[in-house]
Image (cartoon, rainbow, N blue to C red):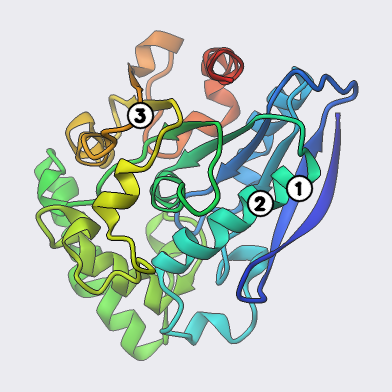
Amino acid sequence: MQAMRASIPTSDNRELSAQLFLPEHEDTTLPAVVIHPATGVHKGLYAACAQYLADHGIPVLTYDYRGTNESALPSDYKDKNIGMSDWMLCDVPAANRFLRSRYPDRKIVAIGHSVGGHGQLVSFQDEPVDAIALVASHAGITRLIPPLPERLKVGFVFNVFTPLTARFLGYVPVDKIGMGKPVPAGIMLQWRHWTRMPQYFFDDPNFPDQGTPLPQRFAKVTAPVLSIVLNDDPWATREASDVLLRRLTGASVEKRDISPASIGAKEIGHMGFFRSKSKDLWEGLYEWVVKAT
C-alpha cells in the first residue's frame, strides 16, 4: 500500500488537501472509494480504514473540506460566507469528480461520515456515484437527541458557544468541545439554523439548492445506500438517521445498527467507527462496498 498527497480542484477555484491510498496490486474489477469527512474532522481520522481497504485492493481518497485543517486558507476562519452547504454542493462533488477522473473505468463508492453523508445525498445529481455508505449520518435536529444531558450540551454549543465565539473570535473553536478542529463561523451558524428546524435543512427556504429543492435532490438518488448507526451514538440515532433515509424514494436502503458489544468494545460513538479499535467492523464495510458494485 502506498499513500500519496493530492490536491482536489473545486468548481469555484478552491484547492482541497487530499490523500490517496493506493493498493500494492491493482485490481480494476474492484471499485474506488472516497470518504467524505465529518465536521471539522481531519482526514487523518480515516487513514486506518482507508489503509485497510487499500490493503484489500481498493484505492481510497480522503480529504479536508474548505475552511478546515489542511484545506483552510488563513482568511477562512473569519469568513462568515463559507457555509456547510459549500461543502455539500462544491467540495463533495469535487472529490467524486477527482476520483472518477483518476479511475474512469471503475465503480465509485462514497462513504459519508456524518455531514459527509448529507453532502453525498445532496449532491448526488451533480456528480453521481455507484453506491453510498452512510456512517453516523443523521439529521442534526437537537430535539431528537434522546439523553437529556447530551441534548442540553448540544443546546449550549449552538445557542451560547457558537454565537458568542463567532461574534468575538470570528470563528468557532469546536476543538475545545471535542468536535475536530476550529471551523469558520459561517459553518456553525448555518448548522445552528438547521438544528432548530423540524425537518432540518429540508425546512430551510434559503438553502442554495441551485434550482433543485432538497426533497427533489434526495429523490434523485438511485444508488444503493447502506446506513450504519452506532447504538451508543447520542446524536446519530436511528430515528435521526431515518429523517434523511425516508427521503430516498428512488434508492434501495440497507440499515445496520451496530452495538459496541458486537466487537467487544465499551464504546464506539459518533467518531469511533473509523478508529483502529473498530477495525472488526471494516470487513463488513468492505464486503458491502464490493457487493454493491
Q: Residues within 10 Å of mark 3 (few under 14, many from 20)?
A: some
Q: Is 23 on the left-hand or right-hand side of 278?
A: right
Q: CA distance from mark 1 to mark 2?
A: 6 Å
Query: Residue at the location (22% across, 63% down)?
Result: 194
Q: Residue furthest bottom?
A: 168
The three-letter code of the residue at mark 3 reads Ala
Labels 1 & 2 near each other (Cβ < 8 A)? yes
Picture quadrant of residue 177: bottom left
Query: Residue 79: percent from the left, percent from the top?
Result: 48, 85
Distance, label 2 to label 3, CA atoms, is 21 Å
Q: Are marks 2 and 3 in contact (CB under 8 Å)?
A: no
Q: Residues within 10 Å of mark 2 (few under 14, many from 20)?
A: many
Upstream in sequence: badge 1 or badge 3: 1
Give the number of the disc on residue 97. 2
Where residue 34 sits, quadrant-wise, is top right
* Horizontal relation, residue 2 to residue 171: left or right: right
Residue assigned mark 1: 101
Amino acid type at circle 1 is Ser
Camera-side residue of 266 and 42: 42
Image spot of residue 82 (x, y percent) = 46, 77
Q: Crowding at label 1, few (<14), some or many (≥20) Cα neighbours within 10 Å?
A: few
Instruction: Answer left or right for 263 relative to 17.
Output: left
Q: Position of residue 246 (x, y in %)?
A: 21, 34
Q: Is residue 68 among the parts visible in the rendering?
A: yes
Please state, as top left, top right, bottom left or bottom right, where the N terminus lies in the image. Answer: top right
Work out whether 51 lies above or below 139.
Answer: above
